[in-house]
Amino acid sequence: MRILVTGAAGFLGSHLARYLISKGHSVVGIDNFITGNIENIEDLFGTAKFSFLKYDVTNHLYVPGKLDAVLHFASPASPIDYLKYPIPTLKVGALGTHKALGLAKEKNAVFMIASTSEVYGDPLINPQHEGYWGNVNPIGPRGVYDEAKRYAEALTMAYHRYHKMPVRILRIFNTYGPNMRLKDGRAVPNFMMQALKGKPITVYGDGSQTRSLCYVSDLVNGIYRLLMSGENDPVNIGNPHEISLLELAETIKRLAGGRSKIIFKPLPQDDPKVRRPDITRAIKLLKWQPRVALEEGLKKTIVYFKAKMK
Ligand code: UDP
């Protein structure tokens, strides 16, 4: 297949592009480098199966040649990024999804939207299944991301129903691994950099809030299975192993071997108190479930961060 990946220089986009190429597909990558990093895809340049366009996908998209799938992964995705780029975040979820859908329709391609557990907001049920409508503050600081992704899902379903297009709605839960930026601002890179430098580890709130962390190779495998399935309705992809942020800080501190203190900082507004995917649908429909245990994935990620710090 010839597959377009928007956000190809980002954390997930770069892993996805590499995985698709390893499966024998050709990839056309697009990125405007707002939060993407060329180093993530450097090794793909010059290989016959990869081509790249530096472009902002909120503008009209023209890609010559056939396309079998359009995977829309472009978006700022760390809370600090959507605070810094609130309007580009809204635009890439809304206008960018519209342009990517239009391109997929033109090419008779399958369309996939990289959606998020943030569509569930600060959830009132735990774990979150795909039938849950969520609890989102539309005008809060995270609203720019949450609502853009909710709009993207609505638009994707409208194209599916009205134009009869094949679509995939992937709800991604917290993911970590190599190619995350050192200063990404999310919990795993923050705690790792702080632990490796012997600086205080900053836990927001009292650390009792929970997340469920998926290693990137597991996630990419789930994405590929969803793409190849015939499933048009949303599917959660994530690791259901739920831990508190304080536990995560202590685990990373131990694995990184530093002597950092754990300190507490104010909890950001609308920070979800719990998050854990119900992956019943992924298990049943895709025969997928994560394999990499948390400590194993964290150790691999520490190796990457150590090398990048040099
Ligand atoms: N967090 C933290 N310390 C940090 C960064 C994040 O305690 O240095 C907390 C954050 O408040 C949230 C959780 O870690 O409760 C996960 O945050 P992250 O930014 O990784 O992603 P989110 O799941 O909120 O989108």
Image (tube, grey):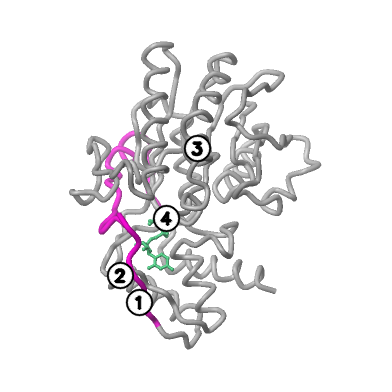
Q: CA distance from mark 3 to mark 4?
A: 15 Å
Query: Do labels 4 and 1 touch, CB within 8 Å?
Result: no
Element on which disc 2 rests: loop
Q: Is residue 308 left or right of residue 221?
A: right
- Return the residue at label 1: 264
Quadrant of picture, ligand 1: bottom left
Q: Nearer the viewer, mark 3 or mark 4?
A: 4
**What amino acid is labelled 2 in the image?**
Gly
Sequence order check: which comes first, mark 3 or mark 2?
2
Q: CA distance from mark 3 to mark 1?
A: 39 Å
Q: Nearer the viewer, mark 3 or mark 2?
A: 2
Q: Which mark is residue 224?
A: 3
Sequence order check: which comes first, mark 4 or mark 2?
2
Q: Residue furthest right?
A: 46
Query: Is 288 inside the magenta-drawn segment?
Result: yes
Count neighbours of disc 1 (C-alpha within 10 A) and say few if under 14, some if 14 to 19, many if 20 or more.
Answer: some
- Return the residue at label 4: 214
Q: Is residue 159 left or right of residue 301?
A: left
Residue 96, placed above or below residue 105: below
Query: Do labels 3 and 4 touch, CB within 8 Å?
Result: no
Q: Is residue 138 left or right of residue 194?
A: left
- Our reading of the magenta stretch's main secondary structure is loop
Q: CA distance from mark 4 to mark 1?
A: 25 Å
Element on which disc 4 rests: strand
Q: Residue furthest top?
A: 163
- Please state, as top left, top right, bottom left or bottom right, where the C terminus lies in the image: bottom right
Query: Do labels 4 and 2 touch, CB within 8 Å?
Result: no
Query: Do labels 2 and 1 touch, CB within 8 Å?
Result: yes
Position of residue 14 measured from the top left corner of the image (x, y, whole percent): 61, 46
